[in-house]
Every structure is written in C-alpha cells, then in structure tokens.
Image (tube, helix red, strand yellow):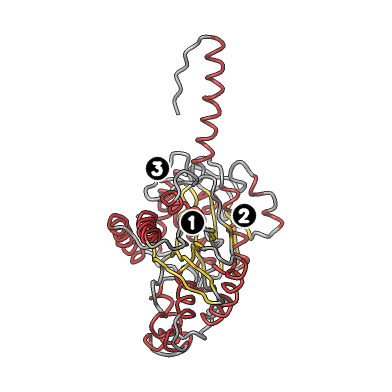
Amino acid sequence: AIGTALARTVGLVGKQLDYLHLDNYLDSESFVHMVSQSPNTRQLFERVVSILSPETAGATQPITEWALESQDFGWATGIEKTIEIEEAAKAFGVEAKTAQRLIKHPLYSYPGGHSFFELYVELVDGFHQLGQTHQGKVLCLYTHSSTLRALLIFLDPRPFSEAFSEFGAYKEGQDNVVLLTYEHGQLSGYSTAVGLSERERAVREAWMSVEQGRREQVTLKPRQIRRIVALVSGGDFAGAGAALKELRVTGNRLGLEVYFVQHGFLGLANNWIELVTEQDTRGMSNHASSPIGSSRFEDFKDEEAQLAAIHHLKPYMEDGALIVMGGDGSMRGARAIYERFGIQVVGIPGSIDDNIAGTTSLGLQSAVALANQSIESLKATSAAMGSVFFVEV
C-alpha cells in the first residue's frame, strides 16, 4: 500500500509534467534512495522500490545517511508515553499534564539522549550537505517522524516557535518517505507518512489489548530493578549461551547485578545461584547448548520444592526479577512462581518445538538448519543407493 500510493502520486505528476513538456524530476529510475541505520527504514525502502521499479528493485541499493537518524530518546527508548510521563512527573515533582508539556518542549533533553532542538540543528546542516552533494537530483529519503517534523519546521516560512507549535507532534510514531529537491540554494520536498492498513491496524489493536491484559497481571517496575537472576530449564536448545551472555552484558551496562542458576529449577531448589562476571561469559555466545546446564525437574510441582526455591530466591527478589528460558513447561513453572509468590518473572521462550504462541523460540532456527542438513545428506545417499528413507522431524 505504501509503495503503490507513492508510485501513483509520482506517476500522475510525471504525466502532467510530460504533457507540459517540462523536466520530470519525479522519474523514479533516477531517484537516489537513502535510509537511516534503523531496519524499519530499510524495510520501508524495499517495499517502496518493489512498486516504483519492479524490474530493477533487486539491483537498487540505498545509501545509509546519518542525517536521517531519529531523535535519541535515551533511557526513554521503547517506553510507552503514559509510563514516560508518569516517571517524569515523579522525577520533577509535578502533575502529569505539566510533565507532558515539559517533555514536549524543544529544549527538553531525554536522559541519556538528545533534545529535539539538537536534532533540528543537525538536520538543517545535514540536509544542506545532502542537497549540495546531489545538485539537480531527487532524493528519496526513508526516515522517522521526529526527523520529518524537524524538516517540516525548517521548510516552514514562519518562525521556529510557531512552526514547532503546529508540527511538534506531527505524524508521531510513523516512518516516512520524503522526496527532496535542492535548487538555487533552497530546499523543497514532498512527504508521505507511513501508517497502517486497516488489516494491520486491527491486528495491532488486538495485540495491544492482549498485551494490556498481560501487563495488568505482570508489571515490571522501570528503574527499580537492581539485579536479575537467570536460569535455563527443560529440554536442550541452541542459542541459550548467546542469550545469557547478552543478559550479562546489557545488565551490567544498566548497572544491574546478574546471577545465573545452575541446572534450572533444580538449581533454585538447591541454591546453586552464582554472581556472573565478564570473564564467566567469555565464549558463551558460541556455546552449542546451555553453558549453565538445564534440567527437567518434575519435583518442582511439589509445594516443598517450590518453598525451598523461593527461600533461596527471595534475597535477590526484593529489588530484582527472575528470567526463565525454556519451553512451555518452563513457562508454566515461571507463571506459577509469579501467581503464587508475587515474584517478578520474565519468560524467554527456548524450544526446538516452537510451540509458544506469539513469538519464535530460541533454538528453532538451529534445529531447522540441522534437520535440513541431515535430509540433504540422506538425499545424496538415497540417489546413490536407490533407497527410500522415511524421515520424522
């Protein structure tokens, strides 16, 4: 839908220019495509180019341009607006409405990030350089809503404050396609915001309602977590080592203490909990299985085993969270811990069965690749020996 709408617009304008015998700047074959480092903008580029130039779409590659990067929201990245406003209101000691106005101010700098005005200054300089470098050409820029707002404010003839009051929240939360021309020292452009189709919107709203229901049951407390305890449970699967290492790296970067439990829920019941250091996780990402062990601990269904595990886990959970990697049985165990004892739990699906709805489990891709490799080997043997093989996956 995105590429079709843009192609229709470009085609209609192009026909009008041809009819008037004027130079057609909107010849899509001559566009210079540019994206930010975000995978969203590259995905958007692929969709648009497949419609604009289906014959040459595979050969067309975009240029990654720093001037198209989104505003850096720092620690607020990925946090819902309502939660962000609540946290800001607590930090500033003001009401939520006042905090919202402060956040929307162009000079407000996000903790660990940048202000909108900083983005605006960098964009003006970056876009002038783009225009001077590509004189006489049309740039097709795949960028973010914050970048588009800065561009609209710059192109607006009114003073900054007036333009910002109108475009400060324009197309918030959307990626955009921008057609930019630079002539006689002046920038001009056409943009189209990328939204959701009716089907995509219905799916998104259904997902949001389900997610809201989950969050009402399990709520992690932003900035109140001081330590995490991670374990791997259930059957073997690849990818656990890489996930555990990333937990340690990200946790330490955020100032958290990271602990690993040896051999899953069995380790919890026996207090096999250890603090993890950088040295402990070296080479862990290349480990074919769980480097901290795993187990199917059927006795965890018993109340005595659960109470023993919680007794050992409790000192870490006053300002911490438990992270469980495993299959559907492990997720049920994690849920039981939350529902019975109120401990904050995060589940990371890990199972070659890939039987947990709504996500892809760790280990699936490796299992499929191994199965495919084995089948390919059997095909060669079958062809050579004239044999027939029955394969169960």
Q: Amino acid at mark 2?
A: Lys
Q: Which numbered tag is attached to residue 9?
A: none
Q: Name the residue located 51 percent from the left edge and 67 percent from the top edge.
A: 320
Give the left or right position of residue 6, taking residue 125 as reference: left
Q: Which residue is mark 2?
A: 245
Q: Amino acid at mark 3?
A: Asn
Q: Residue furthest right?
A: 279
Q: Name the residue located 39 percent from the left edge and 46 percent from the top edge.
A: 356
User: Going from the N terminus, do you reach mark 1 or mark 2 first?
Assistant: 2
Q: Name the residue located 53 percent from the left edge and 13 percent from the top edge.
A: 383
The one nearer the camera, 330 or 113, is: 113
Relative height, residue 16 to residue 86 (above, below): above
Q: CA distance from mark 1 to mark 3?
A: 30 Å
Relative height, residue 362 to residue 73 (above, below): above
| Residue 112 pos. (x, y %) | 58, 76
Disc 2 and disc 3 in contact, CB within 8 angstroms: no
Q: Secondary structure at mark 2?
A: helix
| Residue 60 pos. (x, y %) | 54, 49
Q: Which residue is mark 1?
A: 308
What is the crowding at mark 1: few (fewer than 14 residues within 10 Å), some, or many (at least 20)? Answer: some
Give the left or right position of residue 157, taking residue 248 as reference: left
The one nearer the camera, 313 or 251, is: 251
Q: Amino acid at mark 1?
A: Ala
| Residue 207 pos. (x, y %) | 33, 58
Q: Secondary structure at mark 3?
A: loop
Q: Which residue is mark 3?
A: 355
Q: Quadrant of the N terminus?
A: bottom left
User: Going from the N terminus, do you reach mark 2 or mark 3 first?
Assistant: 2
Q: Residue furthest top?
A: 386
Give the left or right position of residue 393, taking residue 376 as reference: left
